[in-house]
Image (spheres, helix red, strand yellow):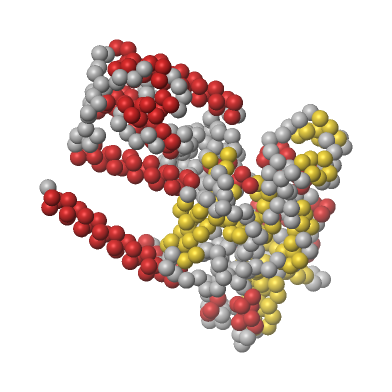
Amino acid sequence: MTFTEWFIFFLVVQVIHFLGTWKLYIKSGRKAWEAAIPIYNGIVLMQIINRPKWWIILLFIPVVNLLMFPVIWIETIRTFGFYKKLDSFLVIVTLGLYIFYINYATDTKYNADRSLKPRSELGEWVSSIAFAIIAATLVHTYFMQPFTIPTSSLEKSLLVGDYLFVSKFHYGARVPSTVIAAPMVHDSLPFTGTASYLKKPQLPYTRLPGLQKIKNNDIVCFNWPADTLATMWGDNSGKFTYKPVDKKTNYVKRCVGIAGDSLEMRNGYFYINGKKNALPDRAKLQFYYTYESKKPINQSTYPKFLIDKERTNVYKILSEYWDNPKVQAAIKENGFLSKIGSDSLYTEVAGGINPQFAQRLKMINVDTKININLTEEEVTRLEKYPLTVSIKKVNHGADNAIFPHVESLGWSQDNFGPIYIPEAGATVKIDTESLPFYEQIIKNYENNDLQVVGENIYINGEKAESYTFKQDYFYLIGDNRHNSLDARYWGYVPFDHVLGKPVMVWFSWDANAASFGEKIKSIRWDRMFTTVHGGGKPVSYRYFVFILIALYIVYSFYKGKKKSTKK
């Protein structure tokens, strides 16, 4: 829905409000016309039900207003003497239209002096829970959101099992475009797995002013642009599912390229505007290296200090098989292999593959070699290991999965570019050669009708030779370079997909531990309440936080005891 359509909807709601409440306004000593003036009628209603005027602000905040409207409906009918649970039930299930019945079919009286306290312990409990959810939803949506690290793409900087606080206000809080959604959950309801939202209606994209702009090397939380999964994690159905931007899967990566940059990757390292990208000292890049040992690699010969590192086997496959396109297609269906060397007869490859398929291709396991995911410090340490023969960094070959998916470019996950990262207001030349870089932006992110007829390109029905971008775009990458699904595969991330800036790790444990007991044992105390950005070794503020929590508990206990003494 456009802003105009939403304004018309707003006026319709005002008409419904007037028709359903004008008699109640009169009974409370107000004028009938006061029920018809937008916003003012809300302020007057807050006075009638004896609630704070600032509540009216909450009615205009998306998602939060879905929780506030039922509260206002219930407060309204109770002000006019309808206290029964059935009345509350009816006003909620009729979306407030039960007030029409009270307005026209009853001779109810206005109770200006009604007690605002719940009439039972259950009512007090429900009231407290309701406002706790409203407050939490407000904070979660517009200020700070908890987030979990599910993958190792930023390993060393952020670990699998880290729980983050993501600031919404650093880059500006994005107003949710999905109007009707369950609070405090993302794209699916707990336990059921069903969608937690309705796809329509949708608000136009709006973002509140931010404190800063995204900078090179910032760690950024965003919605995955290529997401078509039914649920955020665990959907293996393969079916396409349309999702609104704010309900796409949450990702976190490092922003190596910002709007207006020219970006290139050489041998796994980024160059921004011609200069090698200098990462913060907390960032630790990882690449796969082929490690060759003097002896067959097994439990006794494998370096103990690398026991927890990701690794894959090394195989030999007949070169005539490897060079066969049909075999290549079959390999992609049965695993993932990368070429790391060859001789006159065999091609040496590394990765994971279905054992039965490997047997059919007569692949030979190279028992003195293994592929290990390593940082530079770990490579230096491994070079000094007594059984080391050689350590060679893997440099992947051309892969059509790399954006913009043009085979003739010969780009790989380690070598590609340069590419331009679009900036709002910038204009680029559009032709059949450059279109693959910007097609997704023009058609899907900026919602234009795009048609290609022969060599001619039409945007919104008009022939186009250039295009001007409407928003900024960013290039977001994992530090775990050979084990990260990132912008190398899907391309640019639009600013309207940016969720926020991770600012603190508030909890951390080994999410892959075998049992809950093992997870408890694996709690990383030194990572609790550490900052995400900044230089030097992360400092934990956990003791300071624990002291504050203890003081609050003592204060609450003392305050409660004081109240009970007065009674």
Q: Position of residue 442 (x, y in %)?
A: 73, 39
Q: Is residue 561 above or below residue 190?
A: below
Q: Nearer the viewer, residue 365 or 214?
A: 214
Q: Quadrant of residue 368?
A: bottom right
- Left or right of 487? Residue 321 is right
Report the label total. Answer: 0
What residue is rendered at 61% in x and 85% in y?
385
Left or right of 494 in this view: 415: right
Above or below, 3 against 558 in this view is: above
Quadrant assignment, res 451: top right
Q: With respect to residue 463, does 150 lie above or below?
A: below
Q: Residue furthest bottom?
A: 386
Please provide percent x and percent y for residue 233: 51, 49
Which sits in the foreground, 254 or 160? 254
* Residue sitting at x 24%, y 39%: 124
x then y, percent, for residue 483: 62, 62
Q: Nearer the viewer, residue 400 or 432?
A: 432
Q: Is residue 90 above or below residue 272?
A: above
Among all residues in the image, which is located at the extreme top? Answer: 105
Query: What residue is rendered at 59% in x and 54% in y?
Result: 212
Tell me if I can see residue 223 in this picture: no
The quadrant of the picture occupied by the N terminus is top right
Residue 334 is left or right of residue 464, and the answer is: left
State which quadrant residue 50 falls in: top left
The structure residue drawn at horizontal position 66% and vertical position 72%, both measured from the top left corner, is: 289
Q: Is residue 210 left or right of residue 34?
A: right
Q: Residue furthest right?
A: 455
Confirm whether residue 310 shows in the render: yes
Q: Position of residue 331 (x, y in %)?
A: 68, 56
